[in-house]
């Protein structure tokens, strides 16, 4: 039997332990029983480790474990250039830590993924063990770590706000209604109101958490629940101060992904973007003129950009500026929430922006109104009563600085980084029109 006092070693650590007798624990990635030798390849969070059984008694003990059975293997670390990581375990002993595993829907040891996306999602607890399917989520985790580190370094405070709210007033998007102890309530579409209020407490805040949109989109880029990376900061001159912070965040996220998920990026053949010192920007009205001149279509007068036009502008930014990122600023006020600050001198436009990345809108942000009387006027201009917003507006009665912020969709970011053809490939247990399980 394997001694319980033996310390577990990860597969990635084995090259530094040549000559030592160690214990590796993980899932049986692949078993290969041959006539005179049995190979077991274990998979743990760090990678793969191979064990070689040559003694008849040891070969018998190593045979008969189905793939995905959890095993503990103790052996001597021996150099072998042909093995994963250039080392393998020799003279090993094996103990099963789980019962025999049922077969997954496809062989997880194969280099490719032969299953369709519905099959992958239906069996996510096991299919995500495949290195190719696991990798986007490691990249996603590193992205969040980079987001936090960048904003911590800029003096932001992390906050955690309610995901159940009393009124469905944040935006025009449809909302999920729920029964809250007999009182109607809603799943939060955004932490917007809370993070603005907390600017009055901390000046600079951020949050990472789920948001819910009951929009009936059935596309490869939309989810009913996704992870929003939000930030809000006070004492800004205008929306360009927010854009400057976002640039630092993007650089921090990219650097952290390279450092913490380099192995996964290599596995997926990910090319990380270079974040320019100054991300190019174009005003919405100018963007429409360029699209009209360059495509033969005339979008002027439309309040938003079509997906095809976002892709065209991204190609233009890459061609003209060498940047995979592009800020589009000054969206029409009719397309922005009531709390958006209008553009001075051109009140039909806003001090807001979208960030396009590789052909897709990734971030929305801008400067907010900060004077109480301006909120009353903005709501009145839209024919809305201030009564449903009283809790939100109370912060502005007590003095708020000029401020602004942004929200970045984590799954969209990860999907763009990894080249996924569907956002669900970058989402753990996606929730959409058709999927509520697993």
Image (spheres, helix red, strand yellow):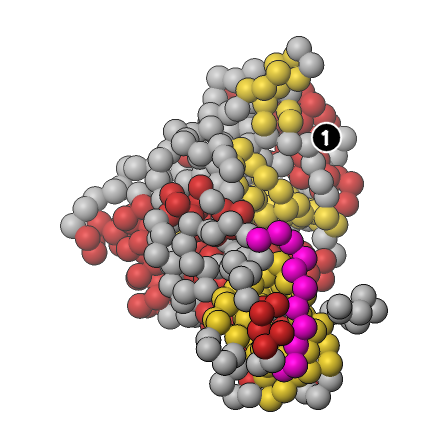
Res 240 seen here: no
Magenta region: which residues? 90-100
| Viewer-proximal residue among 246 and 359 | 359
Question: Within the image, what quadrant is residue 260 found in?
Answer: bottom right
Q: Which residue is mark 1?
A: 395
Question: Within the image, what quadrant is residue 92 found in?
Answer: bottom right
Please provide percent x and percent y for residue 288: 29, 48
Residue lying furthest front: 56
Residue lying furthest top: 182
Please provide percent x and percent y for residue 274: 47, 70
Please provide percent x and percent y for residue 137: 54, 56
Q: Give the left or right position of residue 289, taking residue 22 as reference.
A: left
Q: Quadrant of the N terminus?
A: bottom right
| Viewer-proximal residue among 248 and 261 | 261
Res 432 seen here: yes
Image point 36% across, 52% down: which residue? Answer: 115
Q: Give the left or right position of residue 432, taking residue 249 as reference.
A: left
| Viewer-proximal residue among 361 and 39 | 39
Please provide percent x and percent y for residue 84: 53, 78
Which element is circle 1 on? Answer: helix
Q: Give the overall secondary structure of the magenta segment.
A: strand
Residue lying furthest left: 296
Image point 55% across, 88% down: which residue? Answer: 80
| Viewer-proximal residue among 14 and 433 | 14
- Residue 92 within the magenta-colored segment of the rendering: yes
């Amino acid at each position: 039997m394997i001694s319980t006092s033996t310390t577990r070693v990860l597969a990635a650590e084995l090259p530094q332990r040549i000559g030592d007798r160690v214990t590796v624990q993980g899932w049986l990635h692949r078993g290969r029983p041959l006539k005179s030798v049995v190979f077991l390849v274990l998979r743990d969070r760090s990678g793969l480790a191979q064990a070689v059984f040559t003694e008849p008694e040891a070969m018998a003990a190593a045979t008969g474990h189905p793939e995905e059975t959890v095993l503990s293997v103790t052996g001597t670390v021996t150099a072998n250039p042909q093995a994963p990581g250039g080392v393998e375990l020799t003279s090993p002993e094996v103990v099963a830590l789980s019962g025999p595993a049922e077969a997954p829907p496809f062989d997880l040891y194969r280099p490719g993924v032969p299953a369709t996306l519905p099959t992958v999602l239906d069996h996510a607890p096991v299919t995500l063990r495949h290195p190719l399917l696991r990798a986007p989520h490691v990249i996603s985790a590193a992205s969040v770590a980079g987001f936090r580190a960048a904003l911590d370094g800029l003096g932001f405070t992390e906050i955690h706000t309610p995901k159940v709210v009393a009124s469905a007033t944040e935006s025009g998007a449809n909302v999920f209604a729920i029964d809250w102890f007999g009182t109607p309530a809603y799943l939060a579409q955004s932490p917007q109101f809370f993070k603005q209020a907390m600017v009055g407490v901390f000046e600079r805040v951020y949050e990472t958490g789920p948001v819910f949109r009951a929009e009936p989109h059935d596309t490869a880029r939309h989810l009913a629940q996704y992870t929003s990376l939000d930030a809000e900061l006070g004492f800004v001159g205008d929306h360009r101060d927010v854009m400057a912070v976002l640039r630092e965040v993007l650089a921090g996220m990219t650097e952290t992904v390279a450092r913490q998920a380099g192995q996964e990026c290599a596995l997926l053949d990910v090319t990380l973007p270079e974040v320019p010192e100054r991300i190019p920007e174009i005003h919405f009205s100018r963007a429409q003129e360029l699209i009209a001149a360059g495509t033969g279509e005339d979008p002027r007068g439309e309040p938003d950009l079509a997906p095809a036009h976002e892709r065209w502008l991204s190609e233009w930014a890459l061609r003209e500026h060498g940047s995979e990122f592009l800020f589009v600023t000054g969206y029409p006020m009719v397309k922005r929430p009531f709390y958006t600050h209008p553009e001075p001198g051109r009140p039909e436009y806003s001090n807001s922006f979208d960030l396009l990345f590789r052909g897709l809108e990734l971030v929305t942000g801008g400067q907010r109104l900060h004077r109480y009387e301006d909120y009353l006027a903005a709501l009145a201009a839209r024919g809305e009563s201030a009564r449903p917003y009283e809790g939100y507006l109370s912060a502005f009665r007590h003095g708020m600085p000029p401020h602004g912020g942004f929200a970045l969709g984590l799954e969209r970011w990860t999907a763009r980084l990894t080249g996924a053809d569907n956002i669900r490939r970058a989402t753990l247990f996606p929730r959409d029109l058709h999927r509520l399980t697993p």
